[in-house]
Image (cartoon, coloured by chain):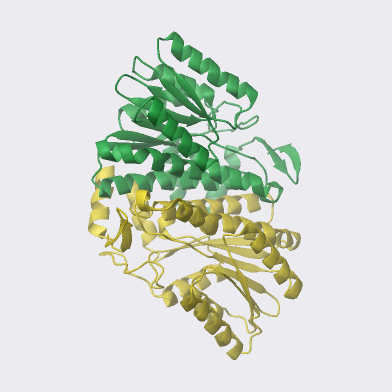
Chain colours: A green, B yellow
Amino acid sequence: MVTSSKRTYASMSNLPGLLQSVFLTLPQTTVNTYLRQRLLNTHRQHGVEETAAECRKLGATTHVFVVDCSNREEIYSSVNQVKKEVGDVTIVVNNAGAIYPADLLSTKDEEITKTFEVNILGHFWITKALLPSMIRRNHGHIVTVASVCGHGVIPYLIPYCSSKFAAVGFHRALTSELEALGKTGIKTSCLCPVFVNTGFTKNPSTRIWPVLETDKVVRSLIDGILTDKKMIFVPSYINISLTIERFLPERAVAAINHVQDIHFEAVIGHKIKMK
Amino acid sequence: MVTSSKRTYASMSNLPGLLQSVFLTLPQTTVNTYLRQRLLNTHRQHGVEETAAECRKLGATTHVFVVDCSNREEIYSSVNQVKKEVGDVTIVVNNAGAIYPADLLSTKDEEITKTFEVNILGHFWITKALLPSMIRRNHGHIVTVASVCGHGVIPYLIPYCSSKFAAVGFHRALTSELEALGKTGIKTSCLCPVFVNTGFTKNPSTRIWPVLETDKVVRSLIDGILTDKKMIFVPSYINISLTIERFLPERAVAAINHVQDIHFEAVIGHKIKMK
């Protein structure tokens, strides 16, 4: 979570690399608070502390809150703590994510549950906790970090794709409801990148899409927040490709998927393979 | 759940009217088993018993299993019971659904959780339980009942829309994975109707879309299953409208939504209103 003198940024994330860049790029001079999740491994925790240190070097006041984004009660109590210690949040980036690449029958039930708890239910709890003060002020920005997998699908990622479709639906329905309520001062954005080079997916490669560096994703997110862009695809041409797919017969879409030749490490038949 | 002499139909449903028509329309002579969920109120339970009675009148052997489709363990144990008492399932219709029309801040946490448990996680557990025997035989059909709300959004239904987007993503990713695994004998369909006149949504009305009778939806579903149609919109022109929306600027989409003038009973600011 990051605040300037007038605005507070909250980011629920397991991508410290991405977050670090977001915080360092945001055009505010004071960085105050930093909220992230407990699911991270030591390496990633280290990344978060490094980010906080970088922010402090820039003269920013930075708070780190450790939250398990799959745990509703913990989210609510942390948000309360943030409100007391830092104040109302203006921009929230719901960025925590879980992914378990595997065929459906090799995916454990607990992995499916965790995917939905983190990738979509967490968004509900954080938004419910922060929305009342945004509605009171008719001011704020809610960023849903989804994925291109929230629009198009990839085999061996059924729970991930399904949860990211849910995130896109959440963003779109929330946008529509805020408008129906006349709360046009509360903005929304949905970030949909292809694979990002954060170690989140092991050894990703495709023949058509690039594997993105975090800098590129962050630049797009910042531009999107600053220009109140609703749906932010990275790279932006992915949107065109997804739209064209809607007009093609199923066989043509299957052929395109074959040409895309997407590979990553996944558990197939309970064994780790490149798929 | 319904079986013919050669094929077994399983339907997880809280829409007995819809199911009854499905069972009575399917071109098989013997109807054996009927699986439905415990969430139903008395009226709906009555509907299920009536359906079973109608099936039996047609000379079909009909089994009724009562299952709470939000409860993973209960789903697994019921599917095991079905396998023992009836045999392998060939066609499964994942039709159970939960909906709580309300603005996000009036929606209880338990209602959000229940929406996801029934509308998407239940699909995962049922599919995981039934898929192994389908894969072994490379034969079967998995029907995901989603909604037009899995493609386009409506205010005061954020959890419902998000869970239906998840169901559409589940169907598409499952379709893609079965193809990648070479299991082309297992078919998939996704049913996306607008409002159906089943009492599921209270007093629905729109200026453009019809409120559908179950007969119309069932006819489309049966046609879709028989012709292995992947995405079944009812009415079918809704797909065109959703596609056009993708090319329009946000303001134009907002204007279309205004013209559509969708109304139903919802809890707004913790009070029941027509919205």
Q: Nearer the viewer, residue A212 or B153?
A: B153
Residue A36 placed where, x, y %? 51, 28
A26 relative position to B67: left or right: left
Query: In the rendered image, which quarter contains the C terminus of chain B?
Result: bottom left
Query: In the rendered image, which quarter contains the N terminus of chain B?
Result: bottom right
Residue shown at 32%/27% (left/top)? Answer: A226
A19 relative position to B55: left or right: left
Q: Nearer the viewer, residue B176 or B13?
A: B13
Residue shown at 33%/41% (left/top)? Answer: A132
Q: Is residue A75 visible?
A: yes
Examine the image and state in which quarter residue A90 appears: top left
Count of number-bearing discs: 0
Residue shown at 70%/62% (left/top)? Answer: B134
Q: Nearer the viewer, residue B172 or A96?
A: A96
Examine the image and state in which quarter residue B58 appears: bottom right
Q: Is residue A236 visible?
A: no
Against A116, is B11 above or below?
below
Against B125, is A122 above or below?
above
Residue A18 placed where, x, y %? 50, 24
Against A264, is B154 above or below?
below
Against A71, is B179 above or below?
below
Residue A5 placed where, x, y %? 31, 19
Residue A25 placed where, x, y %? 40, 18
Residue shown at 66%/65% (left/top)? Answer: B140
